[in-house]
Image: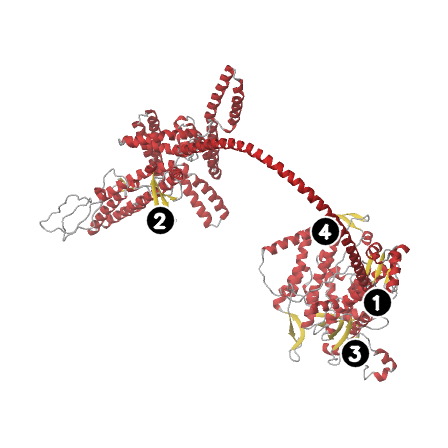
Amino acid sequence: FHYLGNRSAQKSRRDVKGFEETMECLRQIGLKDGDRKLILCFVAATLHLGNIEFEEQGDPDGEGSGESENAKITDASLPSLTKACALLGLNEDEVKEAMLTKLLTVGGKTIHKPQNVAQAQDKRDALAKMAYSSLFLWLVGRINETIAPSLDGRERGDSVDGFSPGLRVSSKAKLNAGFIGVLDIYGFEQFDTNGFEQLLINYANEKLQRHFNRHLFEVEQELYESEGVDWSYITFNDNRPCLELIEGGDCNIGLLSILDDAWGGMGSASEKDVKFVSHLHQQFGGLASPSKGKKKGKGSSQGSCKHKNYITPKFGNDRQFIIVHYAGEVRYTANGFVEKNVESLSNELKDLGSQSSIKLAKEIFACSTGGDSPTSADLTMTPARRSTIRGVSVASQFKTSLQTLVADLEQTQPHYIRCIKPNLEKSSALFDSGEVLRQLRYAGMMETIRIRREGYALREDHASFYNRFHLLLNPEETATGEGISHLVQVLSKRLDITDADWQIGHTKIFLRRELANKLELLALLRVHAAARTIGRFGRVVAERRASKLLTAWGRLRLHMLRLYRERNAATSIQSVYRMVKELEQYKAIQFAAVKVQSFQRRNRAVAIADALRDPYSDMTFAELKALHAEESARLDEAAENNDFQTAAEIEAKIAPLKEAMEAKRPLTRTLLESMIEETQAKLDDALARKAYDECAPLQKKVNGLFKKRDDLPTMSELKEAVKKAEKAVADAAARRNFSAAASGQGAIDAAKKRLQDALDAEGLTLEDVADVGEDAVENGEGEAEETSPYSSRADLETDISALQKRVEEAIASKSFKEASALQMDLDGLESLREKYPTVTEMEVKHSSMKRDMESSIKNKNFAKAEEIQCEIDILEEKIKAEKERNAEAGQTDTSSGADQSDKFVVDRDGERIEFTSRSELEKKIREVSTDLSKIIAAKEFKKATATQEFVDKLEALRPLLPTVSEMKKTLADKKREMQAAISGKDFAKAGELQETIDAFEKEVKREEDKEKENAKPAGTLPRLKGTTPRVMGLSSHNTVQSAPLLGKKFTKLPSSVASKKDSKPVSKLRPKKPILIDVNDSVLLVCQTLATKRGDAAIAAGMNGGVSGIITDTDVT
């Protein structure tokens, strides 16, 4: 928009927040939605009016040069005019005619005068200004109605114009109500070139300065009159002549009236400006017109008298004049004065508002064109020629508005705030004294200071003044009278001053600054003189007191000397006696202390020895239990390997390990009940023996154990908690609320963990729990099979695939809301994958259960073996059913749950071929590829196509069967996880990983063997005729020497042939990492460190970083 500088700033969140706050404010003052919408329409219409552009149109008669000064609206800006008229409810043709023509009434005839481009632009801006100012005045009125006080004159009923119903203040109440107004105007302005705007601003400042001077003078006058002070000699510098020069008065014409008259006549605007300045020089500058001086005679001398506030410049006086304001002289340049003074808002533009088709818009336009405005009042008092041809001038409107403002100020109690800028750069810590002085002068502060200085600048209450200066009176003068009048009379006579320097009011005393400074100086001198007198008297008193003190001190000294000698003798006798007594007591205490220290050192040594003997003091119950299981497994392994020495050592370690585990076993409900029974039995026994002194502590212990029952639930309660959590998850899954089922799985895991902790603490196993199955505790599956929404992993994967396709279709159709809901359901289904094991996972579990059953049979635990066999049968049925469902659904079961193929293909004859290793698959691919080459050579292309498809199926199975290198990489990762578990003392996890690693190593070994059996050499070297390979015997380095083939070449045997079957890895034979200790550590501290960290050796480092010594566990034992 043109009115906004044609800038296109991007909107921000701050703009949105500001718009919302504005709408809320409009709602608070009672505006309805339609009213708020019309307000926005007014603002938008104002901006669209600013976009209307004009251009000169050609002469319609086709005469002359073909062009004229008549203006017309450009075609590009016609939409802006249409939009603005639609928003304001105005007729587009009437608005266009009002802006392009001017209606003149001369001699009773109406003339339509076309406007040029500049005049049309002025009328456009005037219309926009009228719309915006009308909206502003209407909003002010509505705000005043909202905040109007509730007085006795209020009327009830619905408000008009759509205002919210409630109380309305009557006209009588409005007259009785006061108001608070804030007037913020520009200060006095003086630039290098001062125009019409500076004249009006300085005129307003001149008017307000007169009001300020009169107000300040009246305040001083009221204060003096209320205090009864004579103020007749205080003069008041009145700036009324300057105001009469500008606005006229006292039967004299003013500058603004001359400016209004300069509009008439022939000539351009520039010629009218020169004529206006020339008239000013003649009227106020004392310059008579040469052509009219002879005709007017004596009358011309009266009209050309020189005004004291008007100065005619010596140079450039045809367009410049000088006015002496209260703040200084200002030189004005009259370029454009006459043209700027013409009112561009014509009567036809004012009448447009009343013709609006919107009722509220008419009311808004009436705020600026109604009878209460200064413009309409001036119109009624102006002759018909001015109102119909030219309209009210800008200067006249400004003068009337300023007079109304001053009249309002006269009826109020004003308070003035002067704003002074320390510098023009707007920077901190910079004070421009010249600029500040100029602002003070322009603000009229010099006149204010002068008025205060001509009066009595200092005023003080009688009591305060008397308390400060009564010390200037002599004792004789104080005795002759008292009070403020006596003080003023004595000081006036002493200082030879009159009543003009100070006066006594009813409650205050008024005095000038010079007299106040003189009195302050006299009071200070009087205080200094009194201080010197008091000092002399004080020194005399101090000398007398010092002499008396010295005499008393000498006598005291002699007395203290005698007393000291007597006390010294008594002290010597007492000290000898106390020494003997204290020596005996000290020896007794020393003996007791030595006994206590020895006993304490013995206890500390015993504690250290116990800690050394008990290496499990820093381990938890779970760690001890895992270590016990690990040591038991090692014991069994050693017994199987007939390593009885190692078995004996392990068995010796297990006994203290069990004791430590029992000592740290957590308290459960069963253990608590046994403790209660044991304590109750002791209590009953004490009662039977009538040992009542033992009953009280036993009863207290029983009560404490009973209180712990609430915190330790029974096994049945823990089972019930697990069942409730499982039932909640099953219900959620049945309702297809997979997100709730996934979140409820955490509650199941927590309940099962608590149950498992209770079982571990009581030394029970899952077989001892009848109600909770082994899968519920070990695998964490809480959903009952009969209530599960899916019967197999295949059904779950089928639903997941279908849901994934629906998500992709929703995304393709850009239905993101539906895709988001489907994605949430998909996440819920994917979270159920861990509850439904794949065929591979069940097969792994099947292998593990078979190993457990064999172990149970070996340990002759046939009951447990029978239970495991039942579980194996159930698991085999599940595996079989899952494979059948996978075959029906055409889906592959893998550990990741993705859609893949099974590890089998159907050959060309319809037979099913299943592969268990990558080497078998590669062998089959080579065989079929060889057959394919033969078929192609025989040109049997139809058979070759079928064979090629079979080869493609075989190659598609490669990602499902890992190679030996991939399996070895996975094995290395598992070993790193086991080492991390051992470092973190998670021996249970380490044991599980060790079992996995052992099984995986067997699979790798099996895969390597199959790969060697199925490997086909890439090529062989031709043997020499008559030579056969020969194999040499094994050397000490486990190598073989082959027969020379085409030269002397030797190859090593494979590592699988050279190594033993039951050899241990090198990592098992390596010693543990030694512990680094300081060379200054004691042997006891080193032993404690080895026992705590389970180290075999420690290295002592010296100050220079070298090795100072080594100590091992053998040295300690």
| Quarter the C terminus occupies | top left
Horizontal and vertical percent position of residue 735: 48, 36
Horizontal and vertical percent position of residue 837: 38, 37
Please determine whether, in this image, residue 432 is positioned above or below residue 1111.
Answer: below
* Labels 3 and 2: the sequence-earlier one: 3
Numbered tag placed on residue 236 in the rendering: 1
* Labels 3 and 4: the sequence-earlier one: 4
The answer to whether residue 223 is left or right of residue 804 is right
User: How far apart are the two marked residues, 1 and 2, measured between alpha carbons?
Assistant: 103 Å
Amino acid at circle 3:
His
* Labels 4 and 1: the sequence-earlier one: 4
User: How far apart are the two marked residues, 1 and 3, measured between alpha carbons?
Assistant: 30 Å
| Colour scheme employed for the rendering of this structure | secondary structure
- 1 or 2: mark nearer the eye: 2
Q: Is residue 162 visible?
A: yes
**Contact check, label 2 and label 4, Cβ < 8 Å:** no
In the structure shown, which secondary structural element does the residue marked by tag 1 occupy? loop
Numbered tag placed on residue 162 in the rendering: 4
- 2 or 4: mark nearer the eye: 2
Q: Is residue 393 visible?
A: no
Amino acid at circle 2:
Gly
- 3 or 4: mark nearer the eye: 3
- 3 or 2: mark nearer the eye: 2
User: How far apart are the two marked residues, 4 and 1, measured between alpha carbons?
Assistant: 54 Å
Residue on which the image places disc 3: 281
